[in-house]
Amino acid sequence: MSITRRALCAALPPVLAGCVTAHDQLGRADADWSPTIGSFEHHDSARTSYFPEFEAFPGPRSEASVQHLSDLPGLWNAAFSSNERGFALHGVIGGVEAAGPPSVTMFNPSTMEPLKRVTLTEPTADDWVYPGGVAVHGSGYAFAVSGTCLAKIAPSSFDVVSSLDLPAPAGRNMTAYNGFVAAGDGAIILKSHHRKLDCPSQGYRALIECGVAGLPSSTLVIVDPSSNQILWQGVAPEFVGGRVSCISWRGQEYVYLAGADAVHRLIYSRGALQQDHAWGPAGYRSPSATPGTAVVGFGDYVVVQDNAIPTRAPLTVSIISQADSETRWRLTPFGDRAEFSFMPSKPTADVSRSRIYVGDAHAGIAAIDFDPVQGPRVAWQRPYRTGSFLTLCGERRVLVVSDIGRPRYDDYGAPIHTQETCRWLDAASGRDLAQIAGLPRNFGLTITPGPGGAIYYATRTQGLYRLAPSLTS
């Protein structure tokens, strides 16, 4: 009698059940991402969003430059393999009818000219369309995930080398993999996301309108980037909404997951995961708050915030020791000044300067300094409301923020607006350096550094913008 790998996994215990297949050595250490700036949406698998090699103002520029690639409906992010090759994942926001099929378009980052397009999947109108991600792996290949499909794309020919059908524990029309990270040996780590069976809403609105209580536990999958085949799969301790993070600390790699109330830590080793019973679960969610976003590496600590779904409770930032999960600090950087709080995007971490940057769609942005003796304190605040990732750039430390202005809000507490301003701030003081106003909505999307000192600004309906500011724009 033969038994398939999937059938074997299904027979294992429900919590972190693991299925491992034989494999060669995955690759060299530090094989995770291509060294090109912007190869991964948050720079590193710890999701710090600090891009140290990128300088926001590489030279004199008297006028701001705005270029536009429009034919990318339902855009999530862009990633880069060189100055001549960029990859945009689109068709993943707004549903099939609004955004078209999930696709990747290769484009020239300097001219913003499209070069070639491939379709990843052909979802039905009933399928949940949710943003996954595209990134350029250390092997040189681009990988893109949408729904339950992981595609491996050759960077030169732009051919889809292989497509992997990922497990769908809640059914294919209720399951999506929201991005991935890579371990130091190159292994790709993914986590499933779910919406409720009776929920008709698309994208992130499914979480806002239908909630996350009672959803099945997320599936964890590890993929060999060479073969694009599953090495290991298992079940997370609970449903995890925020994206998966992989953080190296004291010679060991760990996967961190933010559950409904607590952070879980798993040990990564040679293509497999096991729960770390010596650490956590570490509580982070404050009363009346909603579950949080991805966990971010912060040296000897990790950072997580709550309120990834709108609520009337103020946003709380938690800093948790990697050495001892009982050692933790909490800070409510904006107090209770706003009626609602909502932040679908994770914090940004500057490890070497012991600083964290956070935002809120109702309260603004804040810089938080951390001292392991004194704890966290707010260094500065600005009234720039945002729901997007905060991008930290270069040795000079320039923080790039998308400002939604003063929008109306719906009954859930989510903003209603059509335009935003992209701002470049001095991260040390919060002082404005440059801005480009009148841009389409970027809320909850990516702001990625790329070739030529430009910021690549994703929009849901108007495509990708290449922004290069002047210091006086």
Image (tube, grey):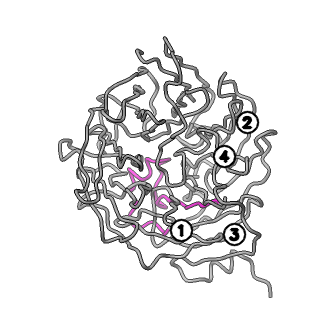
Task: Provide the residue designation for mark 3.
Answer: 231
Which one is earlier in the sequence, the residue at label 3 or at label 4? Answer: 4
Instruction: Give the residue at x 69% y 35%.
Output: 82
Which segment is the magenta one? 188-217
Name the residue carrying label 4.
34
Q: Are marks 1 and 4 in contact (CB under 8 Å)?
A: no
Between disc 3 and disc 2, the foreground one is: 3
Q: Is residue 365 left or right of residue 352?
A: left
x and y, in percent, of residue 46 in the image = 50, 55
Which numbered disc flags the more N-terminal residue, 1 or 3? 3
- Secondary element at image label 4: loop
Image quarter in which the C terminus is found: top left
Q: Is residue 13 above or below residue 406?
A: below
Q: Is residue 110 above or below residue 60?
A: below
Viewer-proximal residue, 52 or 6?
52
Question: Is the residue marked by circle 2 packed among few (<14), some (14-19), or many (20+) residues within 10 Å?
Answer: some
- Name which residue lies at 60% across and 71% down: 269
| Kind of residue indicated by mark 1 | Gln
Q: Report the mark closest to the observer, 3 or 4.
A: 4
The amino acid beneath tag 4 is Ser
Q: Is residue 50 magenta?
A: no
As displayed, is residue 13 above or below residue 314?
below
Name which residue type carries label 2.
Answer: Arg
Q: Which is more N-terminal, label 4 or label 2? A: 4
Amino acid type, residue under disc 3 in the picture: Leu
- The answer to whether mark 1 and mark 2 are in CB contact below 8 A is no
Q: Which residue is mark 2?
A: 117
**Gap between marks 2 and 4, in whole Å?**
21 Å
Find residue 171 and report its horizontal and vertical position in percent: 59, 64
Q: Which mark is residue 252?
A: 1
Q: Is residue 197 magenta?
A: yes
Q: CA distance from mark 1 to mark 4?
A: 21 Å
